[in-house]
Image (tube, helix red, strand yellow):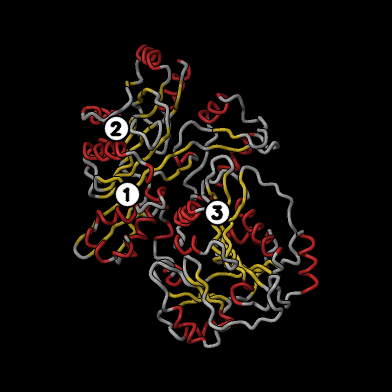
Amino acid sequence: MIRKQLARVRRAGNQALHLPAGQPEAVAMPEDVIVECGWGRWLPAQTWRDPAALASQLLLERAGQRDIAFYVEKPQVVVGSAPQQLFLDPSDAFRLQLSAYRAQRATRRGFNVRRLRTRADVAAINALYRMRRMVPVDPQRVWRERASRVITYALAEDRCTGEVIGVAMGMDHVEAFADPQAGSSLWALAVAPQATYPGVGEALVRYLAEHYLARGRAWMDVSVLHDNVQAISLYEKLGFQRIPAFAVKRRNAINEALFTGPSEGLEGLNPYARLIVDEAIRRGIHAEILDAEGGYFRLTLGGRSIVCRESLSELTSAIAMSRCQDKRVTLKLLAAEGVSVPAQIGADDPAARAAFLARYGAVVVKPVEGEQGKGISVNLTAADEVTAAVERAHGFCDRVIVEQFCSGEDLRIVVIDFRVVAAAVRRPPVVVGDGESSVQTLVEKQSRRRAAATGGESKIPLDDEAERCIRSQGWTLSSVLPAETRLRVRNTANLHTGGTIHDVTADLHPALREAAEKAARVLDIPVTGLDFLVPAVDGPDYVIIEANERPGLANHEPQPTAERFVDLLFPRSRQLTGELHT
């Protein structure tokens, strides 16, 4: 089928008009075309004869949307019509000539690519877009127009979990405005940063290319930010070539960084600090970067000024902070107030450790003070394992504890101003075999993907804990994992050691919500990330194992963690920017 379509495109040439069966061969191109995309409006500039009229239409952009005028022949004239409100988008345009496209034999493992089918798919698309800090779509509009021939959504779905891990939107220019050049374009490509499988983005691009090839389209274009090296590399690999096409947009809070350039010091902030600073700046709050590497900044509005280190602010007392840092104190205080916690002892007495292990069958060893999962060993069932784990933990803190191992989902609940804002299940890193690569190679590749997706924040260490976890499942680092075989490579689900996070806020049982808010009040801490172990997020049973005084708010998209944090610091700023909270 693809070969037949290729032949047809080659015969017709780029200037031929390919229309669906039943339509007349010559159709006049309409004027002043506007295509509703869900995330905003797309204006093909070749249908707009008056640059001033195109500029005026861009000024009608709705709040929270992102309109794009593309293929603007004279962008300087359009921008000149409203220079204070419009700007030339700093993106490059690329074109894939479908006559030269070569279909690749399907090699996808672990996921399928399909069209949008259900309302749940629309919600999954928005979760992905928010996770990638892209403009979400209007769910009602997308669902209402799901059968449209103008716009096509391609989704990548994990075959094992059913989770949507990638999305791309295609635009058919013939259907949109009777394009005499028979073009199409690709927009809003997003891949989950924690996707286990390689090649998701490539599979989505190929799906749409072959979709438009089957319709007889001549080419597919894409617009990509000039500094998005990963995306440009993918498009060039697939045969896209640069073309001189320009886009004009209206200046708004969504795309402010594109027309103002980077603010001094912001580029050095990690994602956890940057998320908060960006939200503050959107509200007109002044941000002064004190130490970008350490995540320190000062926010000022009127006469109120607060210093923060990521989500830790001056509103958290030293007492509350010390309660969270010392894991023994945390559990002692919570247990005294009737909050469910695991049993725990100090690790210094070998006889006590042996008795504790005999009583509970499996234990966890961790430093009394520590973060990012460092020095923690989980589900230890043998005395020699416990001894070795204690020695490792001593490398991170001179005080070590042994704790009852409790099975269940690793649930992080973020509480801000003593109210639950977000809840997410954290899962240990997993690799999927391809029948060719060793476990070590798979881990290294997955670690590189996680690092690239998180700005270097998440990597999978190949340490003693990883080797122990892999051996416990009957494999070694040199084993070749059969195709489609999933292997957990760490027992801990900490994001900094390669774990993934999945939003479950809407599914949270009221008992878990109540326990989290009670724990925050017991610790008297205004912002905290509480680590639960639960049989199910929609059930009432739980234990709390830790409290984090500086939770990573950037890990909980699409929940409004940064918004609620800035609300806490500057309550009046919420009134000034009510549209952010609708």
Q: Quadrant of residue 316?
A: top left
Q: Quadrant of residue 307?
A: bottom left
Q: Residues within 10 Å of mark 2 (few under 14, many from 20)?
A: some
In terms of sequence position, does the residue under pointer 3 or pointer 2 come before the other?
A: 3
Please tell me which residue lies in front, 454 or 211: 211
Q: Secondary structure at mark 1?
A: loop
Q: Secondary structure at mark 2?
A: loop
How far across and down, in percent of the image, does residue 187 sit?
A: 56, 64
- Report the amino acid beneath label 1: Ser
How far across and down, in percent of the image, does residue 513 sit?
A: 30, 40
How far is the residue under mark 1 from the one under mark 3? 38 Å
How far across and down, in percent of the image, does residue 565 sit?
A: 29, 53
Residue for point 51% across, 49% down: 193
Question: Is residue 443 visible to us here?
Answer: yes
Above or below: residue 505 compared with residue 115: above
Residue for point 69% across, 73% down: 22
Question: Is residue 135 visible to us here?
Answer: no
Please tell me which residue lies in front, 18 or 284: 18
Check disc 3 and report the residue beneath it: 117
- Report the amino acid beneath label 3: Arg
Q: Residues within 10 Å of mark 1 (few under 14, many from 20)?
A: many
Above or below: residue 515 compared with residue 505: above
Quadrant of the frame with the N terminus: bottom right
Quadrant of the frame with the C terminus: bottom left
Please tell me which residue lies in front, 118 or 303: 118
In terms of sequence position, does the residue under pointer 1 or pointer 3 come before the other?
A: 3
How far is the residue under mark 3 from the one under mark 2? 49 Å
Q: Secondary structure at mark 3?
A: loop
Check disc 2 and report the residue beneath it: 326
Check disc 1 and report the residue beneath it: 311
- Report the amino acid beneath label 2: Asp
How far is the residue under mark 2 from the one under mark 1? 19 Å
